[in-house]
Amino acid sequence: MREWIILIAAAPTLGGCFVGDENDWASRREIVEAAERCGVSDFEPTEAGAAYAAYVPAGVPDAKAKEDCIYADLRGQGLLVTR
């Protein structure tokens, strides 16, 4: 019983520790701009839930290198992208 009282008393305090999403996810526009800097024009990010992925189709010349470039560009800005 005593454990429950402590848990109930501590719950409001612990709830305040987690306010919002602390991750800074790249927007669609930010991914498109990074793709342009990496040599991929007219890029369409792939929707991945509430975020986007920067998947470059295999038919694009140097697709892997360009995809890595996009992710590195965004990471350098402190932004996250689903991979």
Image (cartoon, rainbow, N blue to C red):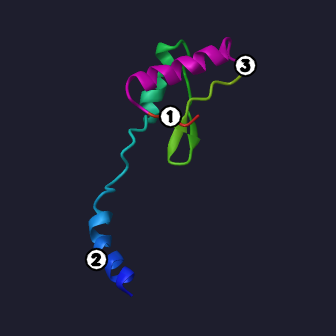
Quadrant for the N terminus, please: bottom left
Query: Looking at the picture, which amino acid does disc 2 mark?
Result: Ala
Could you tell me if residue 33 is visible in this image?
no
Mark 3 or mark 1, whichever is nearer to me: 1
Q: Residue at x 38, y 29 (%)?
A: 78
Residue linked to disc 2: 9
Instruction: Please give left or right for residue 6 compared with residue 83 in the image.
Output: left
Q: Earlier in the sequence, mark 2 or mark 3?
A: 2
Query: In the rendered image, which residue does mark 3 sit on?
Result: 59
- The residue wearing badge 1 is 81
Q: Which mark is residue 5?
A: none
Report x, y in % for residue 23: 39, 42
**Image-based side of 28 in relation to 12, left or right:** right
Is 61 situated above or below 76?
A: above
Label 2 close to label 3 by CB (< 8 Å): no
Q: Which quarter shows the C terminus?
A: top right
Q: Amino acid at mark 3?
A: Gly
Q: Which contiguous range is marked in magenta?
A: 59-79
Residue in front for this viewpoint, 14 or 60: 14
Of labels 2 and 1, earlier in sequence is: 2
Give the residue type at disc 1.
Val
Determine whether the residue tagged by mark 1 lies in a helix, strand or loop: loop
Q: Residue at x 55, y 22 (%)?
A: 42
Pointer 3 or 1: first along the chain:
3
Along the viewing direction, whichever of 80 and 33 lies nearer the viewer: 80
